[in-house]
Image: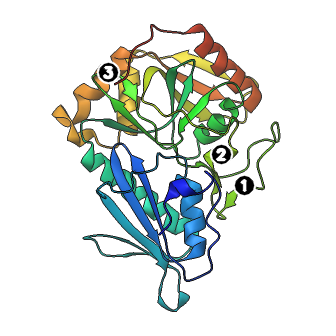
């Protein structure tokens, strides 16, 4: 059994096929263990989760998974205690199923947080969220902003503490559907290419580390890439419009009073929100950096 903190942060264990590897880490205060029965599965899982804090050796396991090849080598199986195994045709599908199940489980275990489907970055000690539909460009914009002085928190899940208005980190590997424009060097040698998705381990991102969080929330951008635009544009949102947009990105609205409406509206009233019409990646990231540099609210402490 090989704990995650015994390996370099991005390097997968070099084990022969058939050996077993247990990977343990902390996510939102929960101890997660993924027992990999296949070396290829272990490499993908480690590359994806290596930046999350390592779990203490004797910590009680809250969420236990087993992942490996299916009998007769017909795809892969993912199993969580108390649930029927999920069949996956590829490593890409297996990782997607693991991430999805884990994110849903974290919502059940931390219902007091408002879980948003959004990327999260830190700039000058403040958190910025990027929300948008799948394919809208939030992960690519995240990649660009990491070259502009921002630090990585997450590209998928942004859990917000509604009392402190702080964002918790969930620094799994950055997931892209396509390679970004060749403005900056792309870490091909560390890339985990699963066909439909490209995963950049946190250690291979600009700076090579992630912010640990939680970080006080400064603002939220609703991103939509428009290839026809010549220049990117920001539009400030009234809290009413921001609240309507924010509700769509909320993953656990029903865990909060009044179906989450009070939580979403309260958050939209508490932080400034904009739409970001993204164009050229370099120009878009320069515009966002200028916004973040000019808007430095009073520092708040996050417990």
Viewer can see residue 129: yes
Residue corresponding to mark 3: 164
Inter-mark Cα distance, 1 to 2:
9 Å
- Point out which mark residue 203 bears: 2
Q: Work out which quarter of the rendered image holds the C terminus and state it.
A: top left
Asked whether 177 or 7 is in front, the reply is: 7
Chain-order first, disc 2 or disc 3: 3
Callout 2 environment at 10 Å: few (<14), some (14 to 19), or many (20+)? some
Disc marking residue 28: none
Say if 106 sits above or below 94 in the image.
above
Residue 165 sits above or below residue 63 on the image: above
Q: Which residue is mark 1?
A: 190
Residue occupying the point 33% across, 22% down: 267
* Residue in view at x 74 percent, y 44 percent: 180
Q: Residue at x 26, y 27 (%)?
A: 263
- x then y, percent, for residue 102: 38, 56
Label 1 residue SS: loop
Which numbered disc flags the more N-terminal residue, 1 or 3?
Answer: 3
Picture colour scheme: rainbow
Q: Is residue 173 above or below residue 288?
A: below
Mark 1 touches mark 2? (CB < 8 Å): yes
| Disc 3 element | loop
Horizontal side, residue 131 vs residue 228: left or right: left
């Amino acid at each position: 059994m090989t704990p995650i903190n015994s390996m370099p942060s991005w390097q997968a264990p070099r084990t022969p096929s058939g050996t077993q590897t247990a990977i343990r880490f902390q996510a939102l205060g929960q101890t997660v263990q993924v027992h990999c029965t296949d070396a290829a599965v272990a490499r993908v899982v480690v590359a994806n989760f290596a930046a999350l804090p390592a779990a203490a050796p004797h910590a009680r396991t809250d969420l236990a998974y087993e992942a490996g090849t299916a009998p007769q080598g017909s795809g892969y199986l993912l199993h969580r205690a108390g649930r029927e195994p999920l069949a996956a045709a590829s490593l890409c599908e297996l990782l997607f199923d693991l991430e999805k199940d884990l994110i849903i489980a974290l919502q059940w275990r931390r219902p007091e947080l408002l879980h948003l489907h959004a990327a999260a970055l830190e700039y000058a000690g403040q958190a910025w969220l990027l929300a948008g539909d799948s394919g809208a460009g939030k992960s690519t914009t995240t990649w660009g902003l990491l070259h502009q002085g921002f630090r990585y928190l997450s590209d998928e899940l942004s859990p917000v503490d509604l009392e402190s208005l702080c964002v918790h980190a969930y620094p799994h590997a950055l997931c892209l559907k396509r390679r970004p424009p060749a403005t900056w060097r792309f870490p091909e040698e560390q890339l985990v290419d699963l066909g439909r998705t490209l995963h950049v381990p946190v250690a291979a991102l600009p700076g090579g580390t992630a912010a640990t969080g939680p970080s006080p929330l400064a603002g939220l951008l609703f991103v939509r890439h428009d290839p026809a635009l010549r220049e990117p544009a920001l539009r400030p949102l009234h809290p009413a419009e921001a609240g309507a947009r924010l509700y769509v990105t909320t993953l656990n609205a029903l865990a909060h009073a009044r179906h989450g409406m009070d939580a979403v509206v309260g958050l939209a009233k508490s932080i400034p929100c904009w739409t970001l019409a993204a164009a050229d990646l370099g120009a878009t990231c320069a515009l966002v950096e200028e916004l973040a540099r000019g808007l430095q609210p009073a520092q708040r402490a996050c417990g």
